[in-house]
Amino acid sequence: MSPSSAADRFGFGRTGSPATCGTILSLMSLRSVLVVGAGIAGSTLAVLLARGGVSITVVERAGQRSMGGPVDVRGAALEVVARLGLLDSLRAAATEVTRLAAVDPAGRVIGWIPTQTSPDAIEVARSDLASILIGAVGAGVEILYGDTVVGLDDDGAGVEVRFERATPRRFDLVVGADGLHSQVRRIAFGAEHRFTRPLGMYIATTPLGTTAPDLHTVFLHGVPGRAAMIHPTTGREGAAFIFRHRSPIQPGDAVDRHLRNRLLTGAYARMGWRVPEMLDHIRGAEDVYFDSINRVQVGRWSRNRVVLVGDAAGCVTVFGEGSSMAIVGAATLAQAVTSSTDLAEALG
């Protein structure tokens, strides 16, 4: 289901929508919710439910989130952001990119295409979008950074949650918004390999920190199976690598710096343009997003009082659409669980 059709089905594109305007219906069966993951989907859901009067706790393993790549917010997702009162903040953080230019090994532009496929789409750094959303949750939302879930005991009436660091607690609902390598999905649904399929590609991004000479252009240099890009973001350049590789990495390998550097060096060692500079930088960088590109397919997104949203429930969307899907998915879930007194029925 597309973001726009999901929004139409659950009413997010209409004035007075319960989940986006805060006029939440009866919450007799939903008083406390644990959201695992403070990314796009988790933060959106936390804002929506908290504004409806639900007690929200967000747990996020990372102390701060990696930059990732710029993403698009468009269509029904923009409507959700607007109803949350965050549209001005989103526009202020937006990039000014309008085109993608291909360059040869010497850096000469050999062709370009426009990047704006929708007049109302807003491109923003993923980390900025996540910061804007989590910053809107309000003082009443508890956020536990540097922690994660290690155990879930769902007895049908609630979920006893064991944390890596915090004291165990009980919640009416647990939402796994913890991304591709979801811990919640692993605990409640099964091993990762059952739901993810590697597509034979890797992606790596890192901020270069250098001043962008052209705020309107993403530059790309590619050969078969490999592409290197420099994005101007909002003035400071960011590097991205996308390349083919047959062997999938295992959960946890994404944080292995030696593996990352070995794969990147092997794939890009003989490429020209600014690729040697990009490689030198990413080898020693701390702020790096690196992972294999996978398809996530889960037959059912809920199991009793545990539910998945965002990339934990389904992806792959490498080129920006995933954030819009995450926002609309979170709004859809908020609508479902807050417009019914029967939580099981809402999740079913």
Image (cartoon, rainbow, N blue to C red):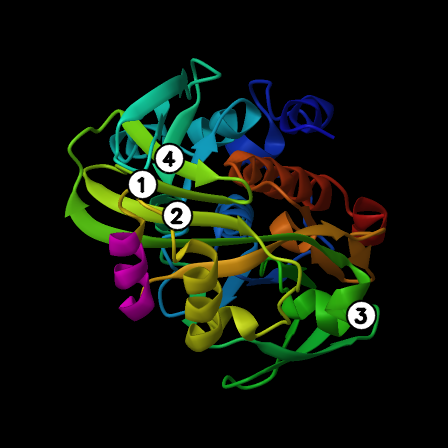
Write down the region rendered in magenta: 276-285
> Measured along the vertical axis of the image, is residue 178 above or below residue 329?
below
Residue hosting label 1? 230
Mark closer to the observer (4, 3) = 4
Residue hosting label 3? 190
Q: Which amino acid does label 1 sit on?
A: Ile
Q: Which amino acid does label 3 sit on?
A: Gly
At a point 44% along the width and 38% down the height, the residue shown is 222
Please report whichever mark, 2 or 3, sits nearer to the chain's N-terminal start.
3
Residue 305 as seen in the image, left or right of residue 223: right
At a point 60% along the width and 76% down the height, the residue shown is 149
Rounded to the nearest whole Å, what is the CA distance between mark 1 and mark 3? 38 Å
Q: Which mark is residue 240?
A: 2
Quick one: SS at disc 4? strand
Tell me the crowding category of disc 2: few under 14, some 14 to 19, or many 20 or more residues within 10 angstroms, Cα based.
many
At a point 83% along the width and 62% down the height, the residue shown is 304
Rounded to the nearest whole Å, what is the CA distance between mark 2 and mark 3? 32 Å
Give x and y (percent) for residue 162. 63, 82
Q: Which of 77 and 346 is in front in this view?
A: 77
Give x and y (percent) for residue 210. 16, 48
Q: Residue 220 carries which label?
A: 4
